[in-house]
Each structure stands twice: as C-alpha cells, then as structure tokens.
Image: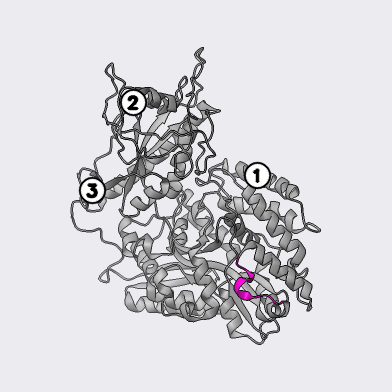
Amino acid sequence: MKGPAIVPRPPQGQLVVFADGRDAAADVTLVGGDSIDEVRRAAGRTPRTFAEIEAALDTSTVDGAERVDELDRYAPWRSAGRLRYTGGPSGLVALLRDLNAHGGVDGVRLHPLVLDEDLAVLSTSGSAPAATSAPRRRSPTSSPTSCGTAPSTGSTSRRTSSRTASTTSSSCSSRPCRSAASTVRRTPAAPCASTWDCGRSADPQPAAAAADLVGVLRLLAVAAVAVLAMSGCAGGDGGAPEAVGYAKDRPPVTIDFWYMPSGGPLQEKAVAEEAKEFHAAHPNITVNPVRVVWEDALTRLSTASASGEGPDVTQLGTTWVGGFSELGALRPYTAAEVDAVGGQDAFTAASWSSSHLIGSPATTAMPWLVDVRALFYRTDVLATAGVDPATAFRTWESLEATLQRIQVAGGGVAPLAIGNENTFGIIHNVAPFVWSAGGDLLDPAGMTSRLAEPAAVDAVHYYQRLVAKYNDPQVAQLVSNDVPAAFAAGRGAVTIDNSQSVGDFLADPGRPGLRAGWATAPLPAGRAGRYGFLGGSNLAILKEAKHPGAAFEWVRFLTGKQSQQRYAVSTGLWPARSEAVAGTKLETEPAYAAFREMIGHGRMYPSVAAWIVVESVIAKDFAELWHAPGELSRDQVRAILDRTSADIDETLADPGNTGIGG
C-alpha cells in the first residue's frame, strides 16, 4: 500500500490517535531507538506501539548507501530518533521479523528515503525485475548493508551528525526529496553482530527478497489492523472500560475444564480443591474437572476443536499454543481480560512468550505452571572427590572437570545420570547449552533452523561428550521421567530435573542416593551466559466454548496469587505468576534456590505453529547422538545437525504443518 495509512474507522466512530511519547489520549504510541533493545524498552512503557523505521533500500541500479551519499550533497539531515535501515530487501525482511519477534511492538511505520524510489521496491511483487544494461553502482566508501548498531557496525543506527528533515509527497522538485529524517551511519565494513542479515554487499536474490518483504509487510499490516481495532474498543477517549468475566447475578452455568497430570498423585485432590474454592467465590459457576492423560490430550483436543464439543477451558502444553492458535481453535483473550489478570508483567518474563503464536498480537493462552530445571547432585560424592560445590558447576569447564574428578575418585557411582530413551526430555536438557553457547534452535522469526550454526554445533558436541564419557549406562536406557527415581536409588552423582523432584526427595529422604546428602545448583554458564529451559502449561479458552465469560473467570482465578500459591506449589511446579512465590516454601527452602535463580535465566521454545513437528524431528535425528558407541568428533556432530536443520526447514516451509489432527 503506497501513501498514508488507510485505517477503518472503529465501531464507536472514534478516530485512531497516533502520538509520540506517552500521551494518555493516544491509541498507538510511535517509538524509536538506536537498536531493537531500545525499541523494546520504549515499547514496554506503553500499551500499543508502532516502531518508526527509516529505510534507504537498494534499487536495481544503486545501493542504498550510495543513494544516501548522493543526497548528502544537497542537505544534512537531523536525527529524528528512529530506527534506521540501509541495504537490500532481505535485510529489511530480517529486521522486521526481528522486531516482530523481539521488539515488543504491534506494528511499524516506514519512512522511505525517497518515496518514488523506495516505494517501488516496497511494492515489488515476486516477479523478477527486468534485466538492465546498467550495472548496479556501489559506494566506494562503504558496504551498502554495513551494520551500525553500536558497538559493531550495522545497518540500523541513529546518526550522530545532524540533518534537516523534509516531509515529501510522491512527487519531487528538482531537489532530491525524501521522507522525514532518514539517517544512516556509515563506517568501514566490519563483521556484523546484529541478529538480522546485514553483512552482504548486495542482495543475492532481489526478487525473492522483495516478495518476502511484501509478505512480511502484509503480516505487519494485519497485526496493525488488529491493534487498531482493539484501540477502538478500549475506551481510548476515557469511556467506560470493557466488562469482563461473568457477573454473579447471571444464570448458573457449568463449565468443563480439561487438565493433564503434571503434579503427581496429589493433583486430582488439588484440582478439586481449587474448583471448590472457586465455586464459593462464584456460586453461579460450577467447574467440572476432567483429567486427560498427556498421551491422549493432543488427539482429544484436536477432535474437540474440529467438532466444537470440547471443554470451555483446557490446559495446554506451552509448545502446543502455536499450533492450536494457527488452527484458530482458541478464543483470544481481549485486552481488557489481559489487563484483568495483571497484564504481561504479572508473569515470569519468559512464560509470556508462549501466550501467543509467534508474530501474532492475539493472546490465546494464559501462563499457568512453569517447568523450570536445574542440577541435582549428591553432596557426599562431591566431598569424596574433593570438589567444592560452590564452584563445581559454575561454567561448562568446571562442570566437566567435576564429572572427571568424580570418575577418577571411583566409589561405584557414575558421574552423570541422564535418560536417553525418550524424545522431548532430551531436547529440554540440550537446549540450555545451545543458548549459553550463543546459538539458537530457530531464527528469531521462527522461519529457519539455526542448529547447524557453529555455536549450536559446539554446544551439542560438548553435551554429547559428557553423556558418552560420564553417563550411567543403566540410566541411559531410561526415559526422563524415570531418572529422578533412579538418582534417588543411588544411580549417578549429578542429574538434571525440574522442581517437582525437590518435593519428592524431601518427602522420602531415606533412599540410598539421598540419605547421605543432596543439593541443587543452577545450570552452568557458557560463553554467552547462563540459560535454562522453561516449559510448563498454559490455560486456553476454546473458540467454541459454551460459556466464555464464565471460562475467563476460572482462568482469572487459577492465575491469581492465592490459587497459584496453593495449586502450583502443591504440584511441585513453579507458578507462572511472579508474586506467588513470596511467602511459600519456594522462597524459603534452600533446595529451591537454584530454581529461583534459573527462572531469571529461562527461555521457552519459539511459539511457532509447527513446533510439535519440529520437536519430533529434533528428537528423531538426535537419537543418533545418544546411541553412538562413544564420543563423536565435532565433524560427526555437525553432519547430524546439518541433516536435522534441513529436516526442520522442510517442516517449517509448510505453515499448516502443525502436527495436530489428521
């Protein structure tokens, strides 16, 4: 779409108000910054935000950097404090996707360098441009896509020198014209440290990149329309707030709630107790809890979504949210409902990333329980090996040195206890090492695999070496769920597990592996820092829920502080609501200290529609790593990860491949 934004008038007839800064009357705040981090910080201070981006794109004959140099001869520009980009369409695609995934914004407002030139690139379709005899000119002084995000060079920056701004229309006078304050820092080419692709001197596939750019812009346009529609319903003019929930003077209803076993034998009693407490507070709403085992849950939920005969509220694994959201099976929570539960800031930072399909503004699942992991170790075995627990697990190097010293000390206990026979539990253990090496599983937009990149290869090679050299051979044949019992029985000196095992070990401390002493420690830090896997469960209202208002009341109750303190703590999982930890054993019991620390370092998998399939691909391909007769070379590990990445990319190429249903 060329020209100014054309926005449908909201149902109430209010005009949509855009403004800079924190304007209480604004529906959408326009934010900028030197980097995506600055944009994210600015966006976090307002409810709905659009990022301002100035773009100088490569055309078919001239690089964007040279176009800027040419315009410099006419007039300087003043900085308007906006994020900037110079280069080919593919780099802008990557920047927009990065903003979408990590910028915390609801849309963007683009300021082209020269309207009639840059808009032609923005509106390019997927067809290749006609061949031209004029070669593409290059700037002799800089890489046209060099990075400017300090401290490294980059394609986005705020220029320190001033320039005058001139707002233009699509026609220009004899003086070259451009949009307001487009600025670029140009420095000699250097390695690009930003997360988007900005290190190439030319776009290798301009037609495909332009088509991709158009697609991303269309997705952002859809998100923007959704945000503006919400602003029209949110009482931006100071009107009455939207009513949420189910009033106590409304007729009695019964809602169905499906939950999955995630809290041991006490869970059924705990669910019944919460339903009883809820009914006392809401006498006109009765909750009918239905226990569904995890092995059947995906199929039953898929069938229920297709038939419209499912529950009103269901528990969802965090990795399922993207797929069910893509299928349109979930009823989005309104902005007023999100506010009613305390908003995003009420929950642990990482858990909110699983509340929606990646790239979507719609919140379709509310964080409930968090699966957080740490190291468990036997204090007696470390003492025998002469290892100080305070430093034993601080870094990758110290962890490996600790395992080696335990092995040398003997004593009949293997250094490590890791189960290799199931699928997803193994990935949960490996992912933190990939992140702490500076790698990732997918790119920020969830479009392609990053497992074949050097950082990921380093991490998997390290982890495979530990398992091959130090793991208990009997434990290696177990599934992850059976490992805590084996550790408590005396198999292995160090293991990785979630916070549920703390309660289990404290309740029965006389077992052989526990009676001489045990403790917990955070996962080790790699060169990029300390990271941990966070999983768990969210609460979703199905699109075909018979009583959505009453269903929301139940979700609001379960995510509230009191219910979280009772239910989450009793199940042994971590409450998603941050304030619910205070005053409970999670705050006071020393064995939970490592988990309190790991919550702050936690990451969740990207909430992509195809994650269920992606996870299965990783589990299948990685089996070769764990079943190898010994330590593999880095080249052998890289070859396996190359195949895994190719399989993942093939999976992600089909947006409808959710792994749910037929």
In 3D space, how far apart are the residues under numbered discs 2 and 1 (Cα atoms)? 41 Å
Residue 479, percent across and down?
69, 67
- Placement of 169 over or under 497, stated as above or below: above
Question: Is the residue under label 1 in contact with that under label 3 (CB below 8 Å)?
Answer: no
Residue 224, percent across and down?
34, 43
- The amino acid beneath tag 2 is Leu
Q: Residue furthest right?
A: 629
Instruction: Answer few, some or many: residues within 10 Å of disc 1's Cα (few below 14, many 20 plus, some between 14 and 19).
Output: some
Camera-near label (2 vs 1) is 2
| Residue where numbered disc 2 is placed | 115
Locate residue 5: give its quadrant: top left
Give whichever of 303, 63 is nearer the camera. 63
Camera-near label (3 vs 1) is 3
- The magenta region covers 386-394
Residue 556, percent across and down?
36, 67
- Placement of 483 over or under 158, stated as above or below: below
- The amino acid beneath tag 3 is Ala
SS at mark 3? loop
